[in-house]
């Protein structure tokens, strides 16, 4: 499928567009960017047209990406447009509805929302905006592929892992439908070509999104579980996965009487909950490392019993803490938290000692904690925003530290894989 501006002559049908082409997806020649998407021969034409903002509609297929942009992001973009003008046209397609002809966005929803923001503030400059209008009829799936390809390129690595996973999996699914009819392997390769996400990350995202189901996926999307631990749980049979998910769901539901203030740290009940989560995870890891079926079943049973006992104890402490918060003064609550956290630290040390007595390796015990902390930073929008105020020297030091982790990880991986 190729795209050309109407009456501009023939355009040669190129191959699958790469990053360098899709990087220009929103420029003033946006129509040309969709040239021969995935080597289809059908020509797609577009016109440049000035359209009133009131006649432009958001695209429901963009909902998954829309949640990544908060009001502050839109305000900042609006201020930039007010200073510098609209650098890139919106890309739309016409659609006849009950209210008449409207134009639905394929690319540029953030800009559209920013223009609406300016209009609401009394700036009439952008009541009418220049758009690239796709005039060749496209199927719903073709339009969705165009929208996703633009977002996967322009959005880069994504700040939210759950959104990235869902977007990658949905894009792969779309490419396996008409008119592309790709195999899963071809669609996966096309996704790697379009997206700036690391190819291995794309493979892991696609695998976990396709295979992980039910409550485990919900817990992952809620960020209660990490992707790395969920990949481990996938090695269990489905009925065991359901049993594990049921336990973690119960743990998530425990009311730890958390503070709503932004700067509040975790109270001691939350620390105890995290300790139980980590210990249960390590015991589940250990069960998979057993040599015989009998040893595996015994280790798994141990993990379940350990969790059930720990959950009952946690609920009791949570109830006590909740009553204390109602009847005690702030200073008394602080003292309860202080003593409770000391107890939680001792409890964690005891549990780690119990796990150490199993066959867990040093790497298997250390990596999940590191991954959990790094994933928390990666998933935090506040972390990304805070980087803008950090010096280049500090950012370079962070990169150097991460490179050091990558380097030693690769060395250890090579050593492990070299053992027959």
Image (cartoon, helix red, strand yellow):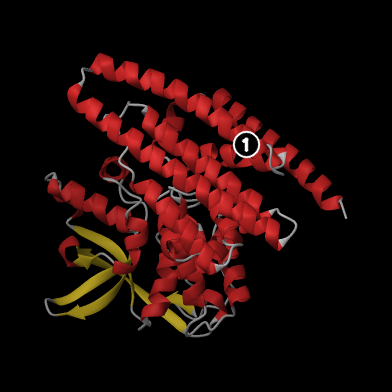
- The percent position of residue 74, horizontal first and vertical second, equals 28, 46
In this picture, is 313 found above or below 212? above
- The percent position of residue 232, horizontal first and vertical second, equals 60, 56
Left or right? Give the position of 36 relative to 59.
right
Q: Nearer the viewer, residue 25 or 262?
A: 262
Secondary structure of the residue carrying numbered label 1: helix
In this picture, is 385 found above or below 333? below
Left or right? Give the position of 283 relative to 72.
right
Asked if residue 237 shows in the view, the reply is yes
- The percent position of residue 269, horizontal first and vertical second, equals 37, 32
Disc count in the image? 1
Q: Nearer the viewer, residue 245 or 123?
A: 245
Query: Farthest residue toward the right?
Result: 420
In this picture, is 17 found above or below 6? above
Residue at image position (29%, 46%) is 70
- The percent position of residue 369, horizontal first and vertical second, equals 57, 38
Residue at image position (51%, 75%) is 37
User: Quadrant of residue 365 in the image?
Assistant: top right
Q: Residues within 10 Å of mark 1 (few under 14, many from 20)?
A: few
In this picture, is 281 found above or below 96? above
Left or right? Give the position of 178 relative to 136.
right
Which quadrant would the C terminus be assigned to in this image? bottom right
Asked if residue 165 shows in the view, the reply is no
Q: Which residue is mark 1?
A: 354
Residue at image position (28%, 20%) is 333
Q: Nearer the viewer, residue 197 or 413?
A: 413
């Amino acid at each position: 499928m190729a795209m050309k501006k109407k009456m501009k002559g023939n355009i040669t049908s190129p191959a699958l567009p790469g990053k360098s082409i899709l990087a220009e997806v929103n420029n003033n020649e946006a129509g040309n960017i969709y040239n021969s998407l995935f080597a289809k021969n059908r020509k797609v034409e577009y016109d440049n047209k000035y359209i009133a903002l009131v006649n432009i509609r958001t695209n429901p297929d963009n909902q998954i990406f829309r949640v990544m942009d908060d009001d502050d992001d839109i305000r900042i973009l609006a201020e930039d447009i007010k200073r510098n003008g609209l650098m890139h046209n919106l890309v739309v397609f016409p659609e006849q509805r009950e209210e008449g002809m409207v134009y639905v966005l394929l690319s540029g929803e953030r800009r559209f929302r920013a223009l609406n923001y300016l209009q609401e503030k009394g700036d009439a400059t952008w009541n009418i905006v220049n758009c690239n209008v796709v005039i060749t009829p496209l199927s719903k799936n073709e339009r969705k592929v165009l929208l996703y390809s633009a977002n996967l390129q322009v959005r880069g690595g994504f700040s939210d892992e759950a959104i990235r996973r869902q977007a990658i999996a949905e894009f792969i699914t779309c490419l396996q439908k008409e008119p592309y009819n790709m195999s899963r392997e071809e669609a996966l390769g096309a996704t790697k070509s379009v997206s700036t996400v690391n190819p291995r990350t794309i493979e892991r995202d696609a695998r976990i999104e396709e295979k992980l189901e039910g409550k485990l996926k919900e817990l992952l999307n809620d960020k209660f579980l990490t992707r790395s631990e969920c990949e481990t749980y996938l090695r269990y049979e489905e009925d065991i996965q359901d049993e594990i998910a049921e336990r973690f769901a119960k743990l998530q539901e425990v009311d730890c009487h958390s503070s709503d203030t932004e700067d509040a740290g975790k109270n001691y009940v939350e620390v105890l909950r995290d300790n139980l989560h980590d210990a249960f995870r390590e015991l589940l890891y250990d069960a998979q490392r057993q040599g015989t079926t009998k040893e595996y079943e015994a280790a798994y049973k141990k993990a379940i019993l350990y969790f059930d006992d720990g959950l009952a104890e946690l609920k009791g402490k949570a109830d006590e803490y909740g009553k204390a918060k109602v009847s005690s003064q702030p200073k008394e609550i602080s003292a309860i938290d202080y003593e409770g956290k000391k107890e939680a630290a001792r409890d964690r040390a005891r549990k780690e000692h119990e796990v150490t007595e199993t066959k867990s390796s040093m790497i298997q015990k250390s990596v999940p904690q590191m991954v959990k902390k790094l994933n928390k930073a990666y998933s935090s929008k506040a972390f990304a925003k805070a980087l803008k105020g950090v010096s280049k020297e500090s950012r370079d030091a962070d990169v150097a530290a991460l490179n050091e982790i990558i380097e030693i990880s690769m060395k250890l991986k090579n050593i492990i894989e070299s053992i027959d």
